[in-house]
Image: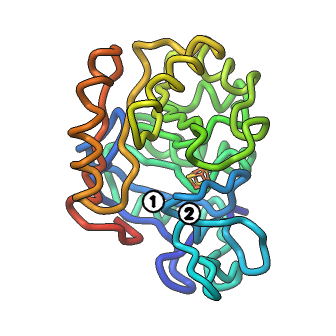
Amino acid sequence: MLRLAVTEPGTPEIFRSIQGEGRSAGEVRTFVRLSGCNLHCTWCDTPYTWNWHGTKWPHEKDRPGAPHKFDPDAETIEMSVEEVAEAVEALPAPGVVLTGGEPLIQEAALAALIARLKRDNPALLIEVETNGTIAPSAALGEAVDLFMVSPKLAHAGDRPALALRPAPLAAFAALDSTWFKFVVREPGDLDEIAALAERFGIPCERIMVMPEGTDGATLRTRESLLRGPAEAAGYAWSDRLHIHLYGDTRGT
Ligand code: SF4
């Protein structure tokens, strides 16, 4: 079984759209958003996958007396691998993006889903978006065409010992199918990326930098501040097209 996020209670967040960020930005993809995460980033744009009522995690959208919390019963749905595969195949696209939350928490079911999808369509491109804290199995490493790994910088507010794990990051760095996507807010973040790349052996030529933001104005402001220095450092740039096209909405 897989635990998925929902667009509304009872409706799994499986949708077809334009990939808005990373190496396949602009391409048509079918998305599957899995629920659950082992990190708790303060600016997370999908807190409805993990920031449950009764937990202590702070979030930037917390307000006095109204923390930005969610009901896991209303926000998740359990589906079999076959049910998810059939929902994906009903929305055909050249590739599928398996995202979250943190998809690798459910690695065994994730691998089964990929095998099921490839069985019917061997040419289907498989992309996995992950925070890089869980190393993929050898089988998953072979089955996935693109890992977009997003290690978290200090501004995400996670404990470094949880967010930056040497063995998983080294495992991803060793896979040619991996690109690293760092979320940035200010110029000092680029220095942090350079230090992490050196520390964990992350190849500079497979680093993308993407502004943090859930509205177009914030993304453009950070782009004007950071794209030039990122380019000078040799990093690729990623926008967030889906935010410009659809805003900060689920299922897009
Ligand atoms: S790793 Fe991703 S899904 Fe998890 S809390 Fe951070 S931004 Fe959200």
Residue at the location (72% across, 65% down)? 57
Instruction: Please name the residue that numbered disc 2 is placed on.
Output: 84
Residue 232 is left or right of residue 134, and the answer is left
Residues at circles 1 and 2 in contact by the CB criterion of under 8 Å: yes
SS class, disc 1 = helix
Q: Quadrant of residue 72?
A: bottom right
Specify whether 183 is left or right of 235. right
Q: Tell me what residue is drawn at x 59 percent, y 21 percent.
A: 196
Q: Is residue 63 above or below residue 105?
A: below
The residue positioned 52% from the left and 58% from the top of the image is: 43
Color style of the picture: rainbow
Can the viewer see residue 118? yes
The residue that appears at 73% across and 37% down in the rendered structure is 160
Which amino acid, mark 2?
Answer: Val
Q: Nearer the viewer, residue 128 or 248?
A: 248
Q: Which quarter of the rendered picture does the C terminus lie within?
A: bottom left
Secondary structure state at the residue bearing disc 2? helix
Is 35 located above or below residue 136 in the figure?
below
Neighbor class of circle 2 (other Cα within 10 Å; few <14, some 14-19, many 20+) is many
Q: Looking at the image, which is closer to me, 43 or 134?
A: 43
Whole-percent x, y for residue 42 in the image: 59, 58
Tell me the crowding category of disc 1: few under 14, some 14 to 19, or many 20 or more residues within 10 angstroms, Cα based. Answer: many
In the rendered view, does 171 fall on the left or right side of 91?
A: right
Residue 53 is left or right of residue 63, and the answer is: right
How many numbered badges does the structure rendering display? 2
Asked whether residue 85 is in view, the answer is: no
CB at disc 2 and ligand 1 closer than 8 Å: no
Q: Position of residue 155 (x, y in %)?
A: 56, 45
Compared to residue 73, the image places residue 145 above or below, namely above
The residue carrying mark 1 is 88
